[in-house]
Image (spheres, helix red, strand yellow):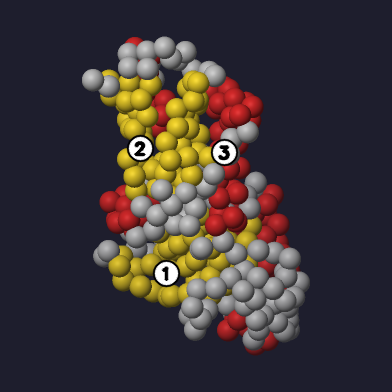
Amino acid sequence: MYAKVIDASFSRISVPTFRLFRDEGYDIFVQDVWTGIGSPLPSYWNLYDSLEAKNISAAYNVINGARPGDEQIDEGHRVIGDLWNEMNFIAVDVEVNGITVEIVRQALDHVRTLGQRAILYSGGWFWADPNRWADGANDPTDFRDEKLWTSDYTKTPTLLAPGYGGWETAVGHQHKGTTFRHGVEVDLNVFDPAFIYKTEEAIMRRHVAESKWYKDAFEEGTKWGLGLWACHARKDFVAACGEKLRASDTRLTVEIIAHQVNQGGSLILLDGDKQYAAIVPADGKRHQVNLYIDDTSKGKFYLWIVGAPLRIQRVGCTEAG
């Protein structure tokens, strides 16, 4: 089962519109942050609103042969600004005539120097055409060990060998170009879920390193051998509940969605040596899950997703009456 992804360049996409896409299973978003000559006006705010909508978010940065690759990545880095560390990946977009193998390598290396995961975006129509390359490269295989996001509108969604560059697989496939949907223009893609969600766990681990509350939760979760998912849940959980859980019998309401329709999972709330658990069906739909916490609580709570890449949408607490 593939993860469904939209990407965009110039359309301004609001939080409500992102939620419409989420209802269709598109809860991963990639924004063009540099075209090779400038930045699309909505770049930063699309990424900001995508994160506000609880989407997994990433960016792509077009490069050309006019400047060194690292300078062009710096342009995108400036646009993304304080959201850089929240990106799932940065794609180096190679589809402008006059590029060289050296410039592509500079761009990939610089993304990593800036602390992000780098992948390549291109298509066989470009990559395998020697007239596109200023250095005479002919379907170069120099990057066959890099992760590839391929563009091919002639195939149904697939991550099999794209037929160029020596790649045996791809992690992403842009299978449909400019599509007008919900009042905006987007491209439609599929990605390997393992590629996407592994980085979401890494983002969560960064939060663990930055916060004592996260650190305590991480250590407790490790003790229980639980999976680490839904990195945005921790802040929402604290903000929504706080001391309220310690006051009386409480109902914790969690709105949650399963990304993979063939794989469900469990939502578990740990309270010291006590567990409250609920099963999330494997149907790809939103569900409201209620966990009832009694007044014997120890007041030290950790919220975890176990068994599948599930995503928490919203958390709320009310007294159970």
Q: Name the residue under label 3.
A: 228
Label 1 sits on a secondary structure element that is strand
Write the residue at 68% across / 86% down. 130
Q: Closer to the camera, 303 or 215? A: 303
**Can residue 80 be spotted in the picture?**
no
Cα–Cα span, label 3 and label 2: 19 Å
Mark 3: which amino acid?
Leu
- Classify 65 as above or below 4: below
* Sequence-wise first label, 3 or 1: 1
Mark 1: which amino acid?
Asp
Residue 145 percent location from the top left of the image: 73, 66
Q: In this view, does 22 lie to the left or right of 191?
A: left
Cα–Cα span, label 2 and label 1: 33 Å
Q: Name the residue under label 1.
A: 187
Write the residue at 43% across / 40% down. 279
- Tag 2–tag 1 contact (CB < 8 Å): no
The residue positioned farthest toward the right in the image shown: 142
Query: Disc number at residue 289?
Result: 2
Cα–Cα span, label 3 and label 1: 30 Å
* Sequence-wise first label, 2 or 1: 1
